[in-house]
Image: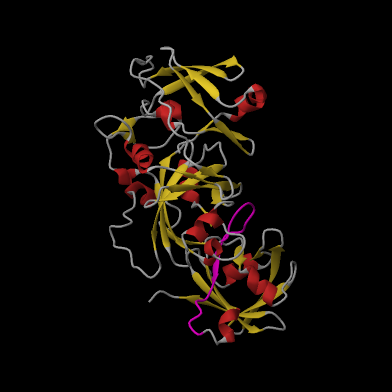
Amino acid sequence: MLLQLIPRNFVERYWKDVSNPISLRLPNDSVCKMFWVRWGDEIWLQDWKRFARSLRCGDLLVFQYKGGSDFNVTIFDDSKLEIDYSNMICIDEQEAKESDEDGYVKITNEEANRNRKGNGKKAKKCSKIVDANKRSCTDSHPDENPNFTLKLSRFSVEGDTLRLRIPTWFSKEYMNELLQRNAMIRSVDEEMAWGVSLYLDESNRNFTMGAGWKSFSREHNLQVGDVCKFEMTQREPLSFTITIVPATKEPCPEQFQENQRVQENSETSPVEDMGYVGNNYGEGISRSCPNHDSESPNLHNKFEVFVTSLDKLVIPSELLKRHNISNGNSVELKVGEGTWFVEVSYNQYLDYGWFTEGWKEFVRECKVKIGDTCLFEMIDVQNHVFKFSIILDV
């Protein structure tokens, strides 16, 4: 089911008098009745496909509110001329079944293909997803949709609270003007779509998928090390299709061929091992070491970190709980004969911890760089002492 977001400022001023369904009347007197749903403070039109099937990329729609639940709609093409309405007829279709419990809606293959290929004999698509007033359409290959690829860490697939951070470069380039705080995600080989909430980290200007991501992850049995390619197929409402390559299967080089311009401008590698990051989260991605020997207790005291910032470093919350490391406690980091003390902060509500006070001095003096993979091994449980080392690529 294709959804359409109603501008929030209009909802705040007028929507209290609008009932279900609304009527969209075209200049040719064709009327389309559409139901709407409320999602938080947002109003979404359901089954927007019935109305949008004849629209083209770049069309401008003007809605005139007539009172009650009635709207007049005027449509202009990309040359700002009013279109010919003779072929525009709203066709009633059976509503797709929805489930509010898990936050997903059903999308048919026909709809998914239409989202990708547009209408008419020749496939059209926007060369870049930008503001509606600046859109232009060109014939292009489907792989040119904005996309990013992630290697999943344990913070995206394990635990009770799962989060998936969208890379900063992608957030800035394609989501900077995003108004809604929700998105629809679906696997490329499935018809079902899942609603996820988006949270903006004001300091780093990147978005994180929150509520709804856990349901998607559980349904698709995502595991640490799985590689996922997220392809933005629609901006409003924001929609992604996801290609999943299990960790046990090595992707072919051409399987995740990235947009060249994105690679050149990205602030991080196109394939990232992402961690548990959200509003006010510190940078740095952590994961426990793979448990190759389930009987070895020492492996429970190790974790690796892929450094993406020198200001803060996220650390596994379960390690803090296991060793009773509380908010405000200090841990000792040993490198050779040197010793540094770093303070731990822990957010009990969001269930994540990070190194703060003393971390900047540590990375400066130990020459830790962004992009390093660091290994922390607890060698003194009682005094919270970690042996620190940097894992070198061989």
**Model colouring:** secondary structure
Point out the residue furthest to the left here: 121
Please state if 302 lies on the left or on the right of 187 as rendered. right
Toward the front, the furthest residue is 94
In this orientation, does residue 134 appear?
no
Is residue 219 shown above or below 15?
Answer: below
The mark tally for this picture is 0
Residue 131 x/y as whole percent = 46, 31
Q: Return the x and y of residue 42 as percentages of the image width and height.
A: 60, 35
Camera-side residue of 66 and 374: 66
Q: Inspect the magenta stretch and tell me whether residue 298 lies in it.
A: no
Q: Position of residue 242 (x, y in %)?
A: 41, 52
Q: Is the magenta stretch mostly helix, strand or loop?
A: loop
Residue 210 is at least partly visible in this image: yes
Horizontally, residue 117 falls left or right of residue 180, namely left
| Whether residue 129 is situated above or below residue 298 in the rendered picture | above
> Looking at the image, which is closer to me, 319 or 220?
220
**Which quadrant holds the C terminus?**
bottom left
Instruction: Please report the bounds of the magenta region as a residue range.
Output: 276-293
Describe residue 73's horizontal placement relative to residue 59 as left or right: right
